[in-house]
Amino acid sequence: MALSLSFTGEGKDMTFDELEEFVRQAREGGVQGDRNVYAELSSSGKVKEMRVRLGEEGDD
C-alpha cells in the first residue's frame, strides 16, 4: 500500500503558512515536482485538506 501525506488546516481552512509546511514535508518525504496533489475545498473554494502520495506513482 502506498503511503500518503495528508495535511489539514488548523482552523477550518488552510493558511499559506500551512501550505508551505505541507510542501516542505512532502519534499522531505521524497515527493517529486511532477507528482499530483489532491485537495478538498470548502464551499467558498478555500483549501481544507491536501494529500499527496509518497513513493512511486501507481504504488498501492
Image (tube, rainbow, N blue to C red):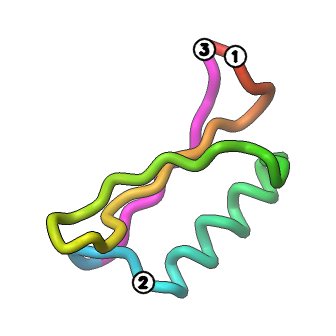
- Element carrying mark 1: loop
Q: Are marks 3 and 1 in contact (CB under 8 Å)?
A: yes
The quarter of the image holding the C terminus is top right
On screen, residue 12 above or below 56: below
Q: Nearer the viewer, mark 3 or mark 2?
A: 2
Distance from label 1 to label 2 (Cα)? 30 Å
Residue 21 placed where, x, y %?
Answer: 61, 74
- Residue hosting label 3: 1
Q: Nearer the viewer, mark 3 or mark 1?
A: 1
Residue 34 placed where, x, y %?
Answer: 80, 47
- Element carrying mark 2: loop
Residue 36 placed where, x, y %?
Answer: 64, 44
The residue range painted magenta reads 1-10
Residue at 29% x, 75% y is: 13
Distance from label 3 to label 1 (Cα)? 6 Å
Residue 47 placed where, x, y %?
Answer: 36, 68
- Crowd class of label 2 (few under 14; some 14 to 19; many from 20; radius 10 Å): some
Query: Foreground residue, 4 or 32?
Result: 32
Earlier in the chain: of badge 1 and badge 2, it is 2
At label 2, the amino acid type is: Thr
- Residue hosting label 1: 59
- Residue hosting label 2: 15
